[in-house]
């Protein structure tokens, strides 16, 4: 996890420790996802296109989803709070534009932050601000 990542003040210390030591998870590290802002309500992350493309050179549709799910999962875990965790139970994505180079940025916005469920919309954009995909994710919040 990059030192530029900002954490909300009320984030449980064990979650900060887990995020910092894991870098957001092995897959997020492999895909070079960088978490820039993190909160339950609004989070931002970026990822290079290079290294995450499919056979004809476009950013892989699954890479969009990994970026979105990584951000939605962390945002849900923040909402869940200390002694709880988030488990993804549903995700869908609509890809509306392709990209072959540069950096993509995902912005995660909470739609519902409940006691047992958290739903987020994640929009992935290219460097020119064009919407590439829209991802919606629901996490179940569980006690440890």
Image: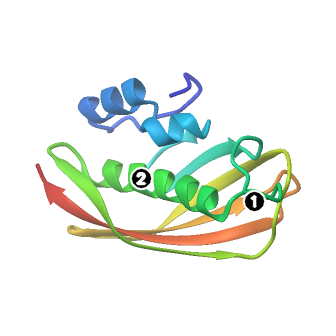
Q: Where is residue 102 in the image (x, y as percent from the top left)?
A: 84, 44
Q: Where is residue 137 in the image (x, y as percent from the top left)?
A: 44, 69
In this rendering, which labeled residue sits more in front, label 1 or label 2?
Answer: 1
Q: Earlier in the sequence, mark 1 or mark 2?
A: 2
Q: Where is residue 1 in the image (x, y as percent from the top left)?
A: 50, 28
Residue drawn at x 69%, y 59% is 60
Q: Is mark 1 on a helix, strand or loop?
A: strand
Q: Quadrant of residue 68?
A: bottom right
Q: Quadrant of residue 135?
A: bottom right
Q: Is residue 58 above or below residue 47?
A: below
Residue drawn at x 24%, y 31% is 14
Label pair 1/2, CB-CB below 8 angstroms:
no
Q: Seen in the image, is 118 located left or right of residue 71? A: left
Q: Seen in the image, is 129 located left or right of residue 34? A: right
The circle drawn on residue 91 is none
Residue drawn at x 81%, y 71% is 97
Residue drawn at x 63%, y 59% is 64
Residue furthest to the front in view is: 55
Decide: few, some or many residues near mark 2? Use Cα within 10 Å; few <14, some 14-19, many ≥20.
many
Q: Quadrant of residue 46?
A: top right
Q: What element carries label 2?
A: helix
Q: Mark 1 points at which residue?
A: 125
Q: Distance between the residues labelled 1 and 2?
A: 19 Å
Q: Is residue 31 above or below residue 72?
A: above
- Residue 54 seen in the figure: yes
Q: Seen in the image, is 65 located left or right of residue 126? A: left
Q: What count of labels does the image hold?
A: 2
Nearest the viewer among 136 and 107 is 136
- Residue 35 seen in the figure: no
Q: Mark 2 points at which residue?
A: 75
Q: Position of residue 63 (x, y in %)?
A: 62, 55
């Amino acid at each position: 996890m990059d030192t530029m990542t900002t954490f909300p003040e009320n984030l449980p210390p064990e979650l900060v420790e887990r995020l910092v030591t894991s870098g957001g998870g092995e897959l997020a590290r492999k895909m070079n996802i960088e978490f820039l802002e993190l909160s339950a309500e609004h989070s931002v992350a970026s990822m290079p296109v290079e290294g995450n493309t499919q056979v004809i050179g476009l950013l892989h549709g699954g890479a969009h989803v990994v970026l979105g799910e990584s951000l939605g999962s962390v945002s849900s875990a923040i909402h869940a709070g200390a002694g709880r965790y988030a488990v993804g139970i549903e995700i869908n994505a609509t890809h509306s534009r392709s990209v072959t180079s540069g950096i993509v940025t995902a912005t995660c916005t909470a739609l519902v932050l409940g006691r047992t469920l958290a739903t987020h919309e994640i929009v992935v954009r290219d460097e020119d601000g064009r919407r590439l995909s829209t991802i919606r994710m629901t996490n179940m919040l569980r006690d440890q």
